[in-house]
Image (cartoon, coloured by chain):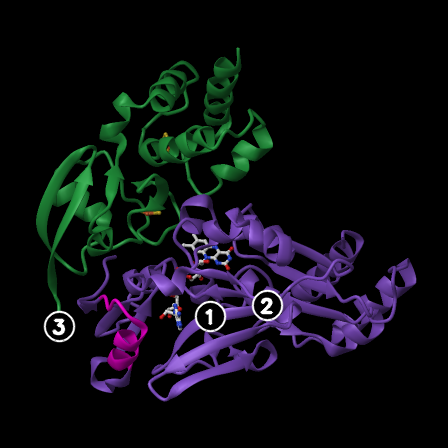
Amino acid sequence: MMKTAQITLTINGEKHIEDVPVRMNLADFIRTKIGLTGTHVGCEHGVCGACTLFLDGVTIRSCLTLAVQADGSEITTIEGYETDKNASDLIKNFHTRNALQCGYCTPGMLASSIEYIEQGNPADRELVKQHISGNYCRCTGYQAIVDAICTTIEERQN
Amino acid sequence: MKAPDFSYEKPNSIPGILSLLEKDELECQLLAGGQSLMPMMNFRMATPKTIVDISGVSELSLITDTPKAIEIGAMVRYCELQDSDVIQKFCPLITMVIPHIAHPAIRNRGTIGGSIGLSDPAAELPAVLLALDGKVEVSSNKGIREEPANKFFKGIYETACSSNELITKIILPKALPKQKFGFYEISRRHGDYAMAGVCIAQDQDLTVRVAFFGVAEKALRIASIEKVLSGNSDFSQSIIENAQNAAEDIQFEGDMNAGPEVKKHLAKVVLERALEGIK
Ligand SMILES: Cc1cc2nc3c(=O)[nH]c(=O)nc-3n(C[C@H](O)[C@H](O)[C@H](O)COP(=O)(O)OP(=O)(O)OC[C@H]3O[C@@H](n4cnc5c(N)ncnc54)[C@H](O)[C@@H]3O)c2cc1C
Ligand code: FES
Ligand code: FES
């Protein structure tokens, strides 16, 4: 019976081969084994969204996914967003619109925001709110985050 | 918290999964999308000895269009249901409902088999299965059987699928051109579990099926409401009121969001709104 497993995965373009305890979740793996601490952990039961990142191109909760389940996958965390055009425009607008204060929610919030833009969705505040409804922010009151996402989409259209 | 210690297996065939489930001493629990099981393990509400990851079997991820029915593999994820043209065409109720289940990152992982297998009283898909009068294909080492929806859900987190069995497929009749469907739910926040919700299907011969979720110990059809609504092509205000009165027959159960009296009120509201929006 398997208690540890060897996994091979790509994180932000870099290949890693690691032995992991099978009970370790992906968030803890990325933070403690790989040392990328930009992925945050809040609730560990899927509710707050802080740990949201990309697995094979779609957002997932890294607290609800075991590292062993990510074997063979491609992961992108906030440390890998620099080279992504949607992400860098969003990051700029998060700054100018004051869409973060403590920054705890920001990595997950950006992941959900990037996905919203990548899917070609409109700058519609109601739809944006629905899309980020799974990401808690205890600082900003959300309006500034919705502003930043809508501004990014509008800039794209002009 | 973190999940307790366990062993992990990822078989690459259905017989491989079934033979593990036969070994009672392993205390296996199936892992599909993990969007309910992982929280339960992190809370230490579930402490399985062995986790059997079923994502390694590609045939469980197929959506198949057969002459009579749409067969959906247990491992098909919510996001795949949402993007499927076959589902949109033949199971439009599913397409209506999916955006209300949780949040995008959870829909990218959660599966139809996990939702049906869990039988959360407030989950949407069990009610969809009941309203569409579908079937659940359940497999074990002893063979394969089909369980009709109205016999499948037994109670809170309790179904007709035993611990030695695997849900392999959800089988739904194909929507016919003149069939109509309705859906409405009330939740505190978009994506939260519903405080009350209802799925409605009206057949070509005007038979109506009504399945509630979030109001009782499990998703359930209400025969007295179905009787009031069946045979009518349109739902006048007086028919809707009669149906709302029949909703009093439900054995309402409170949860941490609302007590039984509030549930009763909300059930009537969602019923009216779903009937008004039926299409
Ligand atoms: C924040 C949050 C919000 C949510 N909101 C909603 C919501 O609004 N509505 C809703 O419906 N759900 C909601 N969910 C739950 C989500 O839909 C789950 O994905 C779903 O309930 C279970 O599917 P899964 O594939 O993740 O199953 P898992 O978590 O992997 O498994 C769930 C259970 O089903 C069993 N199981 C899985 N597959 C099978 C199978 N093939 N045969 C037999 N048993 C099986 C498992 O052993 C386990 O007991 C929410 C979850 C979270 C974290
Ligand atoms: S830490 Fe994963 S959702 Fe809160
Ligand atoms: S910026 Fe502090 S939680 Fe969002």
Q: Which residue is mark 1?
A: B169
User: In which of the image's four quarters is ligand 1 placed?
Assistant: bottom left
Q: Chain of mark 1?
A: B
Name the residue that disc number 2 marks.
B69
- Mark 3: few, some, or many residues within 10 Å (few <14, many ≥20)? few
- Give the distance between the C-alpha atoms of the residues marked 2 and 3, in whole angstroms: 39 Å
Residue B152 image position (x, y, % from top left): 53, 79
Task: Identify the subunit bearing mark 2.
Answer: B
Range of the magenta residues?
B10-21
Q: Which chain is purple?
A: B
Q: Position of residue A137 (x, y in %)?
A: 41, 35
The three-letter amino acid code for the residue at tag 1 is Lys
> What residue does disc 3 label?
A1
Q: Residue at x 27, y 85 (%)?
A: B22
| Label 3 chain ID | A
Q: In 3D space, how far apart are the residues under numbered discs 1 and 3 (Cα atoms)?
A: 28 Å
Which shade of the palette goes to chain A?
Answer: green
Residue drawn at x 31%, y 42% as measured from the top left: A56
Disc 2 to disc 1, C-alpha distance: 12 Å
- B166 vs A36: above or below: below
Frontmost of labels 2 and 1 is 2
Tell if the residue under mark 1 belongs to the same chain as the one under mark 3: no
Residue B215 placement: quadrant: bottom right
Q: Tell me which amino acid carries mark 3.
A: Met
Percent from the top left, x then y, of residue B261? 68, 67
- Can you say whether B193 is above or below B146 in the image? above
